[in-house]
Image: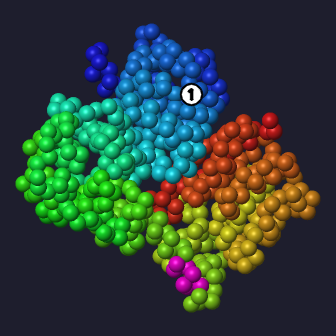
Amino acid sequence: MNKRNYMNTSVQEPPLDYSFRSIHVTQDLLSEEPRTGLRPVRHAKSGKSMTQSLWLNNNVLTDLRDFNHAVSQLLEHPENLAWIDLSFNDLTSIDPVLTTFFNLSVLYLHGNSIQRLGEVNKLAALPRLRSLTLHGNPIEEEKGYRQYVLCTLPHITTFDFSGVTKADRTTAEVWKRMNIKPKKVRIKHNITLSHAKTPPKSEAERVGRGVAHLLQVGEGDGLAGQHLMGLAVFNMDGGALSQAQSCDAHLAVLARMEESSACSSGLSPHSRAPPAAAAPGPSPRSRCYSSTPWRGSGRALRPRRGGTASVTSPSGHMTGTRIQQGSSSPQGLPLLSYALIFPSRSLQPRAQVGTMSPAIALAFLPLVVTLLVRYRHYFRLLVRTVLLRSLRDCLSGLRMEERAFSYVLTHALPGDPGQILTTLDHWSSHCEYLSHMGPAKGQILMRLVEEKAPASALELGTYCGYSTLLIARALPPGGRLLTVERDPRTAAVAEKLIRLAGFDEHTVELIVGRSEEVIPRLRTQYQLSRADLVLLAHRPRCYLRDLQLLEGHALLPAGATVLADHVLFPGAPRFLQYAKSCGRYRCRLHHTGLPDFPAIKDGIAQLTYAGPG
Protein backbone atom coordinates (compact mmCIF):
# COMPACT_ATOMS: atom_id res chain seq x y z
CA MET A 1 0.00 0.00 0.00
CA ASN A 2 1.53 3.32 -1.05
CA LYS A 3 1.60 6.36 1.14
CA ARG A 4 -1.37 8.13 -0.47
CA ASN A 5 -3.62 5.09 -0.14
CA TYR A 6 -2.53 4.70 3.47
CA MET A 7 -3.39 8.33 4.23
CA ASN A 8 -6.86 8.00 2.70
CA THR A 9 -7.51 4.79 4.62
CA SER A 10 -6.13 5.79 7.99
CA VAL A 11 -8.10 9.03 8.12
CA GLN A 12 -11.28 6.96 8.15
CA GLU A 13 -10.03 4.72 10.95
CA PRO A 14 -11.49 5.21 14.45
CA PRO A 15 -9.17 6.78 17.02
CA LEU A 16 -6.95 4.94 19.47
CA ASP A 17 -8.86 5.94 22.61
CA TYR A 18 -7.10 5.95 26.02
CA SER A 19 -9.45 8.46 27.67
CA PHE A 20 -10.57 8.10 31.32
CA ARG A 21 -7.79 5.59 32.11
CA SER A 22 -6.12 7.54 34.97
CA ILE A 23 -2.82 7.48 33.05
CA HIS A 24 -0.02 9.28 34.91
CA VAL A 25 2.91 8.75 32.49
CA THR A 26 2.96 7.99 28.79
CA GLN A 27 4.69 4.66 29.37
CA ASP A 28 1.39 3.42 30.88
CA LEU A 29 -0.05 3.44 27.36
CA LEU A 30 1.91 0.29 26.56
CA SER A 31 0.23 -1.63 29.38
CA GLU A 32 -3.28 -0.16 29.11
CA GLU A 33 -5.94 -1.42 26.75
CA PRO A 34 -7.66 1.23 24.60
CA ARG A 35 -11.37 1.78 24.82
CA THR A 36 -13.50 -0.06 22.28
CA GLY A 37 -15.81 1.89 20.01
CA LEU A 38 -18.48 1.03 17.50
CA ARG A 39 -15.85 0.02 14.96
CA PRO A 40 -12.64 -1.81 15.84
CA VAL A 41 -9.27 -0.27 15.03
CA ARG A 42 -7.40 -2.05 12.24
CA HIS A 43 -3.88 -3.26 12.96
CA ALA A 44 -0.91 -3.95 10.70
CA LYS A 45 0.97 -7.23 10.56
CA SER A 46 3.30 -5.95 13.25
CA GLY A 47 0.32 -5.55 15.62
CA LYS A 48 0.45 -1.75 15.60
CA SER A 49 -2.57 0.43 14.94
CA MET A 50 -3.22 1.95 11.52
CA THR A 51 -5.06 5.02 12.81
CA GLN A 52 -4.01 8.67 12.72
CA SER A 53 -5.87 9.75 15.85
CA LEU A 54 -4.77 9.36 19.47
CA TRP A 55 -7.04 10.34 22.37
CA LEU A 56 -5.52 10.79 25.83
CA ASN A 57 -8.13 13.11 27.31
CA ASN A 58 -9.38 13.02 30.92
CA ASN A 59 -6.25 11.49 32.42
CA VAL A 60 -3.67 12.83 34.89
CA LEU A 61 -0.68 13.42 32.63
CA THR A 62 1.71 16.07 33.92
CA ASP A 63 4.29 15.83 31.12
CA LEU A 64 4.90 14.00 27.83
CA ARG A 65 8.20 12.33 28.66
CA ASP A 66 8.93 9.35 26.35
CA PHE A 67 5.86 10.28 24.28
CA ASN A 68 7.66 9.57 21.00
CA HIS A 69 8.71 6.12 22.15
CA ALA A 70 5.20 5.22 23.28
CA VAL A 71 3.61 6.44 20.06
CA SER A 72 6.09 4.54 17.91
CA GLN A 73 5.15 1.36 19.79
CA LEU A 74 1.42 1.93 19.29
CA LEU A 75 1.14 3.27 15.72
CA GLU A 76 2.41 1.77 12.49
CA HIS A 77 3.09 5.23 11.05
CA PRO A 78 3.53 7.68 13.94
CA GLU A 79 4.84 10.37 11.60
CA ASN A 80 1.34 10.63 10.05
CA LEU A 81 -0.40 11.34 13.37
CA ALA A 82 -3.01 14.02 12.60
CA TRP A 83 -5.19 14.26 15.72
CA ILE A 84 -4.02 14.35 19.35
CA ASP A 85 -6.46 14.92 22.20
CA LEU A 86 -4.73 15.85 25.49
CA SER A 87 -7.63 17.74 27.05
CA PHE A 88 -8.43 17.59 30.76
CA ASN A 89 -4.99 16.56 31.97
CA ASP A 90 -2.51 18.38 34.23
CA LEU A 91 -0.04 19.66 31.62
CA THR A 92 1.62 22.92 32.66
CA SER A 93 3.34 23.61 29.35
CA ILE A 94 3.23 22.65 25.69
CA ASP A 95 5.88 19.96 25.28
CA PRO A 96 8.16 20.47 22.23
CA VAL A 97 7.64 16.80 21.35
CA LEU A 98 4.29 17.79 19.83
CA THR A 99 6.06 19.92 17.22
CA THR A 100 7.78 16.84 15.79
CA PHE A 101 4.49 15.59 14.27
CA PHE A 102 4.44 17.74 11.15
CA ASN A 103 1.15 16.24 9.87
CA LEU A 104 -0.70 17.23 13.04
CA SER A 105 -3.87 19.14 12.11
CA VAL A 106 -6.05 18.80 15.25
CA LEU A 107 -4.68 19.39 18.76
CA TYR A 108 -6.87 19.57 21.87
CA LEU A 109 -5.22 21.04 24.98
CA HIS A 110 -8.22 22.53 26.77
CA GLY A 111 -8.77 21.91 30.45
CA ASN A 112 -5.08 21.74 31.42
CA SER A 113 -2.88 23.96 33.59
CA ILE A 114 -0.83 25.85 30.98
CA GLN A 115 0.37 29.04 32.68
CA ARG A 116 2.34 31.05 30.09
CA LEU A 117 0.78 32.45 26.94
CA GLY A 118 4.18 32.33 25.26
CA GLU A 119 3.93 28.53 25.14
CA VAL A 120 1.74 28.96 22.06
CA ASN A 121 4.80 30.09 20.08
CA LYS A 122 6.03 26.50 19.98
CA LEU A 123 3.07 25.44 17.86
CA ALA A 124 4.12 27.76 15.02
CA ALA A 125 6.40 24.94 13.85
CA LEU A 126 3.34 22.84 12.85
CA PRO A 127 2.56 23.78 9.23
CA ARG A 128 -0.68 21.79 8.96
CA LEU A 129 -2.29 22.69 12.29
CA ARG A 130 -5.87 23.79 11.61
CA SER A 131 -7.86 23.14 14.81
CA LEU A 132 -6.63 24.06 18.31
CA THR A 133 -8.25 24.31 21.75
CA LEU A 134 -6.72 26.02 24.79
CA HIS A 135 -9.73 27.17 26.82
CA GLY A 136 -9.94 26.09 30.43
CA ASN A 137 -6.23 26.86 30.97
CA PRO A 138 -4.98 29.76 33.11
CA ILE A 139 -3.73 31.47 29.95
CA GLU A 140 -7.35 32.03 28.94
CA GLU A 141 -7.52 34.82 31.52
CA GLU A 142 -4.61 36.70 29.92
CA LYS A 143 -5.48 39.96 28.19
CA GLY A 144 -5.60 39.53 24.42
CA TYR A 145 -5.59 35.72 24.70
CA ARG A 146 -7.53 34.97 21.52
CA GLN A 147 -5.85 37.70 19.45
CA TYR A 148 -2.38 36.54 20.50
CA VAL A 149 -3.06 32.95 19.47
CA LEU A 150 -4.51 33.98 16.11
CA CYS A 151 -1.50 36.24 15.44
CA THR A 152 0.96 33.50 16.37
CA LEU A 153 -0.87 30.76 14.43
CA PRO A 154 -2.44 32.49 11.40
CA HIS A 155 -3.19 29.21 9.59
CA ILE A 156 -5.65 27.71 12.09
CA THR A 157 -9.31 27.73 11.03
CA THR A 158 -10.93 26.60 14.28
CA PHE A 159 -9.93 27.83 17.73
CA ASP A 160 -11.61 26.74 20.97
CA PHE A 161 -14.39 25.00 19.00
CA SER A 162 -15.22 28.29 17.28
CA GLY A 163 -14.57 29.02 13.61
CA VAL A 164 -12.01 31.72 12.87
CA THR A 165 -13.71 34.37 10.72
CA LYS A 166 -12.28 37.22 8.67
CA ALA A 167 -13.37 39.60 11.41
CA ASP A 168 -11.33 37.56 13.92
CA ARG A 169 -8.23 37.85 11.78
CA THR A 170 -8.77 41.58 11.26
CA THR A 171 -9.17 42.11 15.01
CA ALA A 172 -6.06 40.05 15.70
CA GLU A 173 -4.05 42.05 13.17
CA VAL A 174 -5.14 45.35 14.69
CA TRP A 175 -4.34 44.04 18.18
CA LYS A 176 -0.90 42.93 16.99
CA ARG A 177 -0.07 46.37 15.61
CA MET A 178 -1.24 48.03 18.84
CA ASN A 179 0.37 45.69 21.37
CA ILE A 180 3.41 43.96 19.83
CA LYS A 181 6.29 46.38 19.40
CA PRO A 182 8.72 45.89 16.51
CA LYS A 183 12.26 44.91 17.29
CA LYS A 184 14.60 47.81 17.96
CA VAL A 185 17.51 48.45 15.60
CA ARG A 186 20.88 48.44 17.33
CA ILE A 187 23.02 51.38 16.21
CA LYS A 188 26.81 51.40 16.04
CA HIS A 189 28.38 54.79 16.88
CA ASN A 190 31.69 54.26 15.07
CA ILE A 191 30.26 54.62 11.56
CA THR A 192 31.52 57.64 9.64
CA LEU A 193 30.11 59.41 6.63
CA SER A 194 32.56 57.65 4.35
CA HIS A 195 30.86 54.34 5.17
CA ALA A 196 27.64 55.61 3.64
CA LYS A 197 29.29 55.39 0.22
CA THR A 198 29.09 51.60 0.35
CA PRO A 199 25.62 50.36 -0.54
CA PRO A 200 23.72 49.30 2.59
CA LYS A 201 22.24 45.80 2.66
CA SER A 202 18.88 46.78 4.16
CA GLU A 203 16.78 49.78 5.15
CA ALA A 204 17.54 49.11 8.81
CA GLU A 205 21.27 49.38 8.06
CA ARG A 206 20.64 52.57 6.06
CA VAL A 207 18.82 54.17 9.00
CA GLY A 208 21.48 52.96 11.43
CA ARG A 209 24.29 54.55 9.41
CA GLY A 210 22.54 57.89 9.14
CA VAL A 211 21.56 58.21 12.79
CA ALA A 212 24.92 56.92 14.06
CA HIS A 213 26.82 59.45 11.99
CA LEU A 214 24.43 62.15 13.09
CA LEU A 215 25.30 61.36 16.69
CA GLN A 216 29.02 61.42 15.84
CA VAL A 217 28.81 64.83 14.16
CA GLY A 218 26.63 66.26 16.91
CA GLU A 219 29.09 65.22 19.63
CA GLY A 220 32.47 65.30 17.84
CA ASP A 221 32.07 68.66 16.09
CA GLY A 222 30.62 70.25 19.23
CA LEU A 223 27.69 72.14 17.71
CA ALA A 224 27.16 74.56 20.58
CA GLY A 225 28.34 71.78 22.91
CA GLN A 226 24.91 70.10 22.85
CA HIS A 227 23.77 66.53 22.17
CA LEU A 228 21.48 65.73 19.27
CA MET A 229 17.88 65.48 20.42
CA GLY A 230 15.97 64.35 17.31
CA LEU A 231 15.69 64.62 13.56
CA ALA A 232 12.49 64.72 11.50
CA VAL A 233 12.43 64.80 7.73
CA PHE A 234 9.36 66.04 5.94
CA ASN A 235 8.33 66.30 2.31
CA MET A 236 6.92 69.37 0.61
CA ASP A 237 3.35 68.65 1.83
CA GLY A 238 4.40 68.20 5.43
CA GLY A 239 4.15 64.39 5.53
CA ALA A 240 6.93 62.10 6.74
CA LEU A 241 9.19 60.46 4.18
CA SER A 242 9.74 56.73 3.98
CA GLN A 243 12.48 54.99 5.95
CA ALA A 244 14.99 54.85 3.08
CA GLN A 245 14.21 58.39 1.86
CA SER A 246 14.47 59.70 5.39
CA CYS A 247 17.94 58.21 5.83
CA ASP A 248 19.18 59.67 2.53
CA ALA A 249 17.86 63.04 3.58
CA HIS A 250 19.61 62.64 6.93
CA LEU A 251 22.95 62.14 5.13
CA ALA A 252 22.37 65.28 3.13
CA VAL A 253 21.66 67.17 6.34
CA LEU A 254 24.92 65.87 7.78
CA ALA A 255 26.85 67.11 4.79
CA ARG A 256 25.22 70.54 5.16
CA MET A 257 25.98 70.50 8.90
CA GLU A 258 29.64 69.70 8.27
CA GLU A 259 29.81 72.48 5.72
CA SER A 260 28.15 74.93 8.11
CA SER A 261 30.40 73.86 10.96
CA ALA A 262 33.49 74.26 8.81
CA CYS A 263 32.40 77.73 7.70
CA SER A 264 31.78 78.86 11.26
CA SER A 265 35.28 77.75 12.27
CA GLY A 266 37.03 79.17 9.21
CA LEU A 267 37.65 75.76 7.59
CA SER A 268 36.94 74.52 4.11
CA PRO A 269 33.99 72.12 3.83
CA HIS A 270 36.35 69.44 2.53
CA SER A 271 39.40 70.20 4.65
CA ARG A 272 40.16 70.84 8.29
CA ALA A 273 43.27 72.98 7.57
CA PRO A 274 43.02 76.70 8.48
CA PRO A 275 42.73 79.16 5.54
CA ALA A 276 45.81 81.04 4.38
CA ALA A 277 44.18 84.43 4.60
CA ALA A 278 40.73 85.61 5.42
CA ALA A 279 39.14 87.25 2.42
CA PRO A 280 37.29 90.51 2.99
CA GLY A 281 33.49 90.39 2.95
CA PRO A 282 30.81 88.93 5.10
CA SER A 283 31.82 87.04 8.16
CA PRO A 284 31.89 83.24 8.08
CA ARG A 285 28.83 83.18 10.30
CA SER A 286 26.83 85.36 7.93
CA ARG A 287 27.72 83.03 5.04
CA CYS A 288 26.44 79.99 6.90
CA TYR A 289 23.63 81.32 9.06
CA SER A 290 20.96 83.91 8.88
CA SER A 291 21.97 87.08 10.71
CA THR A 292 18.67 87.37 12.56
CA PRO A 293 18.43 85.09 15.62
CA TRP A 294 15.25 83.05 16.11
CA ARG A 295 13.29 84.46 19.02
CA GLY A 296 10.43 81.97 19.24
CA SER A 297 8.61 80.94 22.39
CA GLY A 298 9.97 77.41 22.51
CA ARG A 299 7.90 75.83 19.77
CA ALA A 300 9.59 73.81 17.04
CA LEU A 301 9.56 75.43 13.61
CA ARG A 302 7.11 73.82 11.22
CA PRO A 303 8.81 73.24 7.81
CA ARG A 304 7.26 74.77 4.71
CA ARG A 305 7.90 74.62 0.99
CA GLY A 306 11.33 76.06 0.42
CA GLY A 307 11.32 77.22 4.05
CA THR A 308 14.03 77.43 6.69
CA ALA A 309 15.43 74.70 8.89
CA SER A 310 16.16 75.69 12.49
CA VAL A 311 19.65 74.81 13.79
CA THR A 312 21.73 75.95 16.73
CA SER A 313 24.52 78.36 15.91
CA PRO A 314 27.89 78.33 17.73
CA SER A 315 26.68 81.29 19.80
CA GLY A 316 23.75 79.31 21.14
CA HIS A 317 21.01 81.17 19.18
CA MET A 318 18.45 79.36 17.04
CA THR A 319 18.88 80.57 13.47
CA GLY A 320 17.27 79.67 10.16
CA THR A 321 19.06 78.65 6.98
CA ARG A 322 17.32 78.62 3.62
CA ILE A 323 17.04 75.22 1.94
CA GLN A 324 16.23 75.44 -1.73
CA GLN A 325 13.69 73.10 -3.23
CA GLY A 326 16.15 71.76 -5.78
CA SER A 327 18.86 70.69 -3.31
CA SER A 328 19.59 66.98 -3.34
CA SER A 329 21.21 64.33 -1.18
CA PRO A 330 24.41 62.41 -2.05
CA GLN A 331 22.21 59.50 -3.22
CA GLY A 332 20.36 61.72 -5.72
CA LEU A 333 17.14 61.99 -3.65
CA PRO A 334 15.55 65.48 -3.66
CA LEU A 335 15.87 66.98 -0.20
CA LEU A 336 12.94 69.31 0.30
CA SER A 337 12.90 70.63 3.86
CA TYR A 338 13.90 69.35 7.29
CA ALA A 339 13.99 70.38 10.93
CA LEU A 340 16.72 69.79 13.47
CA ILE A 341 15.80 70.11 17.13
CA PHE A 342 18.52 70.50 19.77
CA PRO A 343 17.77 70.71 23.52
CA SER A 344 18.66 73.85 25.35
CA ARG A 345 18.11 75.06 28.88
CA SER A 346 16.57 78.31 27.67
CA LEU A 347 14.68 76.78 24.75
CA GLN A 348 12.62 73.61 25.32
CA PRO A 349 9.74 72.32 23.19
CA ARG A 350 6.36 72.97 24.75
CA ALA A 351 3.83 70.12 25.11
CA GLN A 352 0.86 70.56 22.81
CA VAL A 353 -2.54 70.11 24.44
CA GLY A 354 -5.57 69.48 22.24
CA THR A 355 -8.16 67.04 21.08
CA MET A 356 -7.54 63.80 19.20
CA SER A 357 -6.92 64.19 15.51
CA PRO A 358 -9.85 63.12 13.29
CA ALA A 359 -7.45 60.91 11.34
CA ILE A 360 -6.53 59.02 14.51
CA ALA A 361 -10.18 58.68 15.44
CA LEU A 362 -11.01 57.30 12.01
CA ALA A 363 -8.16 54.81 12.34
CA PHE A 364 -9.98 53.22 15.28
CA LEU A 365 -13.28 52.99 13.39
CA PRO A 366 -12.49 49.59 11.74
CA LEU A 367 -11.54 48.20 15.16
CA VAL A 368 -14.82 49.37 16.70
CA VAL A 369 -16.85 47.95 13.82
CA THR A 370 -14.95 44.66 14.03
CA LEU A 371 -15.58 44.37 17.77
CA LEU A 372 -19.28 45.12 17.33
CA VAL A 373 -19.61 42.48 14.62
CA ARG A 374 -17.52 39.94 16.50
CA TYR A 375 -19.37 40.36 19.81
CA ARG A 376 -22.84 41.21 18.50
CA HIS A 377 -24.37 38.25 20.34
CA TYR A 378 -23.01 39.46 23.67
CA PHE A 379 -24.30 42.95 22.90
CA ARG A 380 -27.80 41.60 22.21
CA LEU A 381 -27.66 39.58 25.42
CA LEU A 382 -26.69 42.69 27.38
CA VAL A 383 -29.56 44.68 25.90
CA ARG A 384 -32.16 41.97 26.63
CA THR A 385 -31.00 41.02 30.13
CA VAL A 386 -30.13 44.46 31.51
CA LEU A 387 -31.55 47.37 29.55
CA LEU A 388 -34.93 46.03 28.44
CA ARG A 389 -35.50 44.15 31.69
CA SER A 390 -34.83 47.23 33.83
CA LEU A 391 -37.10 49.35 31.63
CA ARG A 392 -39.99 46.88 31.85
CA ASP A 393 -39.54 46.50 35.61
CA CYS A 394 -39.92 50.26 36.02
CA LEU A 395 -42.94 50.50 33.70
CA SER A 396 -44.85 47.50 35.07
CA GLY A 397 -43.86 47.60 38.74
CA LEU A 398 -43.35 43.82 38.65
CA ARG A 399 -40.22 41.76 38.41
CA MET A 400 -39.58 39.75 35.27
CA GLU A 401 -40.05 36.42 37.14
CA GLU A 402 -43.49 37.58 38.31
CA ARG A 403 -44.48 38.53 34.76
CA ALA A 404 -43.34 35.12 33.56
CA PHE A 405 -45.46 33.37 36.21
CA SER A 406 -48.52 35.40 35.16
CA TYR A 407 -47.93 34.26 31.59
CA VAL A 408 -47.71 30.61 32.72
CA LEU A 409 -50.98 30.92 34.64
CA THR A 410 -52.84 31.99 31.50
CA HIS A 411 -51.15 29.68 28.97
CA ALA A 412 -50.25 26.41 30.76
CA LEU A 413 -52.28 23.58 32.24
CA PRO A 414 -51.82 23.18 36.02
CA GLY A 415 -50.38 19.84 37.10
CA ASP A 416 -48.50 19.30 33.80
CA PRO A 417 -44.75 20.03 34.37
CA GLY A 418 -43.92 19.43 30.70
CA GLN A 419 -46.37 22.04 29.43
CA ILE A 420 -45.22 24.53 32.07
CA LEU A 421 -41.61 24.11 30.95
CA THR A 422 -42.62 24.55 27.29
CA THR A 423 -44.53 27.73 28.20
CA LEU A 424 -41.49 29.15 29.98
CA ASP A 425 -39.33 28.42 26.92
CA HIS A 426 -41.84 30.21 24.69
CA TRP A 427 -41.94 33.20 27.05
CA SER A 428 -38.14 33.44 27.05
CA SER A 429 -37.74 33.27 23.28
CA HIS A 430 -40.71 35.44 22.23
CA CYS A 431 -41.39 37.82 25.13
CA GLU A 432 -38.55 38.42 27.62
CA TYR A 433 -35.28 36.57 28.02
CA LEU A 434 -35.53 34.48 31.20
CA SER A 435 -31.86 33.54 31.76
CA HIS A 436 -32.96 29.99 32.54
CA MET A 437 -31.39 26.63 31.71
CA GLY A 438 -33.25 26.17 28.43
CA PRO A 439 -34.32 23.06 26.49
CA ALA A 440 -30.85 21.97 25.28
CA LYS A 441 -29.31 21.87 28.74
CA GLY A 442 -32.60 20.58 30.13
CA GLN A 443 -32.36 17.41 28.05
CA ILE A 444 -28.83 16.79 29.34
CA LEU A 445 -29.94 17.35 32.94
CA MET A 446 -32.96 15.03 32.69
CA ARG A 447 -30.92 12.29 31.02
CA LEU A 448 -28.28 12.39 33.76
CA VAL A 449 -30.90 12.35 36.53
CA GLU A 450 -32.64 9.39 34.94
CA GLU A 451 -29.32 7.53 34.62
CA LYS A 452 -28.21 8.18 38.21
CA ALA A 453 -31.69 7.76 39.77
CA PRO A 454 -30.71 9.64 42.98
CA ALA A 455 -32.68 8.98 46.13
CA SER A 456 -31.93 12.50 47.34
CA ALA A 457 -30.88 15.52 45.27
CA LEU A 458 -29.75 19.04 46.17
CA GLU A 459 -30.05 22.17 44.00
CA LEU A 460 -28.27 25.40 44.83
CA GLY A 461 -29.94 28.22 42.93
CA THR A 462 -33.67 27.72 42.34
CA TYR A 463 -34.26 30.96 40.43
CA CYS A 464 -37.68 30.67 38.73
CA GLY A 465 -37.92 26.89 39.29
CA TYR A 466 -37.18 25.75 35.72
CA SER A 467 -34.34 23.35 36.57
CA THR A 468 -36.22 22.30 39.73
CA LEU A 469 -39.11 20.99 37.62
CA LEU A 470 -36.66 19.15 35.35
CA ILE A 471 -35.04 17.30 38.26
CA ALA A 472 -38.36 16.58 39.99
CA ARG A 473 -39.81 15.06 36.79
CA ALA A 474 -36.85 12.67 36.43
CA LEU A 475 -36.59 11.60 40.10
CA PRO A 476 -37.32 7.95 40.84
CA PRO A 477 -40.40 7.09 42.96
CA GLY A 478 -39.78 8.18 46.55
CA GLY A 479 -36.98 10.54 45.55
CA ARG A 480 -36.54 13.85 47.35
CA LEU A 481 -35.23 17.21 46.14
CA LEU A 482 -34.04 20.12 48.30
CA THR A 483 -33.58 23.41 46.46
CA VAL A 484 -31.99 26.57 47.92
CA GLU A 485 -32.65 30.16 46.77
CA ARG A 486 -31.20 33.26 48.43
CA ASP A 487 -33.65 35.88 47.04
CA PRO A 488 -37.02 35.77 48.93
CA ARG A 489 -39.02 37.41 46.11
CA THR A 490 -37.66 35.02 43.47
CA ALA A 491 -38.17 32.08 45.84
CA ALA A 492 -41.84 33.04 46.27
CA VAL A 493 -42.41 32.91 42.51
CA ALA A 494 -40.50 29.62 42.19
CA GLU A 495 -42.55 27.97 44.94
CA LYS A 496 -45.82 28.98 43.25
CA LEU A 497 -44.55 27.48 40.00
CA ILE A 498 -43.43 24.23 41.68
CA ARG A 499 -46.80 23.78 43.43
CA LEU A 500 -48.63 24.66 40.20
CA ALA A 501 -46.78 21.79 38.51
CA GLY A 502 -48.16 19.37 41.14
CA PHE A 503 -45.10 18.67 43.37
CA ASP A 504 -45.73 18.72 47.12
CA GLU A 505 -43.31 19.58 49.92
CA HIS A 506 -42.38 15.93 50.50
CA THR A 507 -40.98 15.70 46.96
CA VAL A 508 -39.60 19.24 46.51
CA GLU A 509 -38.68 21.35 49.54
CA LEU A 510 -37.69 24.98 48.92
CA ILE A 511 -35.25 26.58 51.37
CA VAL A 512 -34.76 30.36 51.41
CA GLY A 513 -31.27 31.48 52.48
CA ARG A 514 -27.65 31.79 51.49
CA SER A 515 -26.03 28.56 50.37
CA GLU A 516 -23.01 28.98 52.66
CA GLU A 517 -25.42 29.25 55.62
CA VAL A 518 -27.81 26.47 54.58
CA ILE A 519 -25.25 23.74 53.76
CA PRO A 520 -23.94 23.35 57.34
CA ARG A 521 -27.58 22.89 58.54
CA LEU A 522 -28.71 20.37 55.93
CA ARG A 523 -27.91 17.31 58.06
CA THR A 524 -29.38 18.53 61.35
CA GLN A 525 -32.25 20.80 60.32
CA TYR A 526 -33.39 19.30 57.01
CA GLN A 527 -32.49 15.62 57.61
CA LEU A 528 -30.32 15.36 54.48
CA SER A 529 -27.58 12.86 55.32
CA ARG A 530 -26.29 12.47 51.74
CA ALA A 531 -26.81 14.10 48.36
CA ASP A 532 -26.54 11.60 45.50
CA LEU A 533 -26.88 14.41 42.94
CA VAL A 534 -26.04 18.09 43.32
CA LEU A 535 -26.83 20.85 40.81
CA LEU A 536 -24.88 24.10 41.13
CA ALA A 537 -26.89 26.79 39.30
CA HIS A 538 -26.56 29.92 41.44
CA ARG A 539 -23.40 32.05 41.12
CA PRO A 540 -20.36 30.54 39.37
CA ARG A 541 -17.95 32.36 41.68
CA CYS A 542 -19.53 30.48 44.64
CA TYR A 543 -19.24 26.99 43.10
CA LEU A 544 -15.83 26.18 44.55
CA ARG A 545 -16.73 27.42 48.05
CA ASP A 546 -19.98 25.43 48.19
CA LEU A 547 -18.37 22.27 46.78
CA GLN A 548 -15.74 22.38 49.51
CA LEU A 549 -18.49 22.93 52.11
CA LEU A 550 -20.31 19.82 50.86
CA GLU A 551 -17.07 17.85 51.14
CA GLY A 552 -16.30 19.23 54.59
CA HIS A 553 -19.71 18.24 55.97
CA ALA A 554 -19.54 14.75 54.40
CA LEU A 555 -22.68 15.25 52.31
CA LEU A 556 -21.19 13.69 49.15
CA PRO A 557 -21.08 9.88 49.12
CA ALA A 558 -18.69 7.98 46.85
CA GLY A 559 -20.14 7.94 43.34
CA ALA A 560 -22.18 11.12 43.83
CA THR A 561 -22.69 13.31 40.75
CA VAL A 562 -22.11 17.07 40.87
CA LEU A 563 -23.44 19.11 37.94
CA ALA A 564 -22.41 22.73 37.44
CA ASP A 565 -24.10 25.05 34.97
CA HIS A 566 -22.55 28.13 33.30
CA VAL A 567 -18.96 26.89 33.69
CA LEU A 568 -17.93 28.47 30.35
CA PHE A 569 -20.14 31.58 30.34
CA PRO A 570 -19.75 33.54 32.52
CA GLY A 571 -17.34 30.78 33.59
CA ALA A 572 -15.99 29.11 36.72
CA PRO A 573 -12.26 28.49 36.03
CA ARG A 574 -11.22 28.08 39.67
CA PHE A 575 -13.95 25.49 40.20
CA LEU A 576 -12.87 23.48 37.14
CA GLN A 577 -9.21 23.75 38.08
CA TYR A 578 -9.90 22.45 41.57
CA ALA A 579 -12.04 19.56 40.32
CA LYS A 580 -9.27 18.44 37.95
CA SER A 581 -6.33 18.90 40.27
CA CYS A 582 -7.64 17.62 43.62
CA GLY A 583 -7.80 13.99 42.40
CA ARG A 584 -11.24 13.25 43.88
CA TYR A 585 -13.35 13.80 40.79
CA ARG A 586 -13.69 12.49 37.26
CA CYS A 587 -14.58 15.43 35.06
CA ARG A 588 -16.59 15.70 31.87
CA LEU A 589 -17.82 18.80 30.07
CA HIS A 590 -21.05 18.87 28.05
CA HIS A 591 -20.75 21.68 25.48
CA THR A 592 -23.91 23.65 24.71
CA GLY A 593 -24.94 27.21 23.96
CA LEU A 594 -27.02 29.74 25.82
CA PRO A 595 -30.78 29.41 25.18
CA ASP A 596 -31.81 31.77 22.36
CA PHE A 597 -28.10 32.64 21.89
CA PRO A 598 -26.48 29.45 20.52
CA ALA A 599 -23.43 31.38 19.28
CA ILE A 600 -22.41 32.07 22.90
CA LYS A 601 -20.72 28.87 24.01
CA ASP A 602 -21.52 27.44 27.43
CA GLY A 603 -21.47 24.05 29.07
CA ILE A 604 -22.44 21.82 31.99
CA ALA A 605 -19.62 20.22 33.99
CA GLN A 606 -20.27 16.69 35.25
CA LEU A 607 -18.15 15.60 38.22
CA THR A 608 -18.19 12.11 39.66
CA TYR A 609 -17.03 12.02 43.27
CA ALA A 610 -14.59 9.19 44.02
CA GLY A 611 -14.55 9.70 47.77
CA PRO A 612 -12.24 11.59 50.16
CA GLY A 613 -8.58 11.39 49.18
Relative image position of residue 4 (x, y in whole percent): 27, 22
The residue shown at (18%, 57%) is 286
Residue nearer the viewer, 357 or 244: 244
Quadrant in the picture for the N terminus? top left
Residue nearer the viewer, 413 or 25: 25
Residue 571 among magenta residues: no
Quadrant in the picture for the C terminus? top right
Relative image position of residue 386 (x, y in whole percent): 55, 75
Q: Is residue 555 left or right of residue 106?
A: right
Relative image position of residue 569 (x, y in whole percent): 56, 57
Q: Residues within 10 Å of mark 1 (few under 14, many from 20)?
A: many
The residue shown at (73%, 61%) is 460
User: Taking the image as drawn, is residue 83 in sight?
Assistant: yes
Range shown magenta: 387-393
Residue 579 figure quarter: top right
The residue shown at (38%, 56%) is 343
- Give the prevailing secondary structure in the magenta stretch: helix
Q: Is residue 350 left or right of residue 607?
A: left
The residue shown at (42%, 51%) is 179
- Most extreme residue toward the top is 46
Relative image position of residue 75 (x, y in whole percent): 45, 18
User: Taking the image as drawn, is residue 447 in sight?
Assistant: no
* Protein image colouring: rainbow
- Residue 96, compared with residue 511, is above or below; it is above
Q: How many marks?
A: 1
Q: What secondary structure is found at the residue carrying circle 1?
A: loop
- Residue 443, compared with residue 211, is above or below; it is below
- The amino acid at mark 1 is Tyr
- Most extreme residue toward the right is 524
Q: Which residue is mark 1?
A: 18
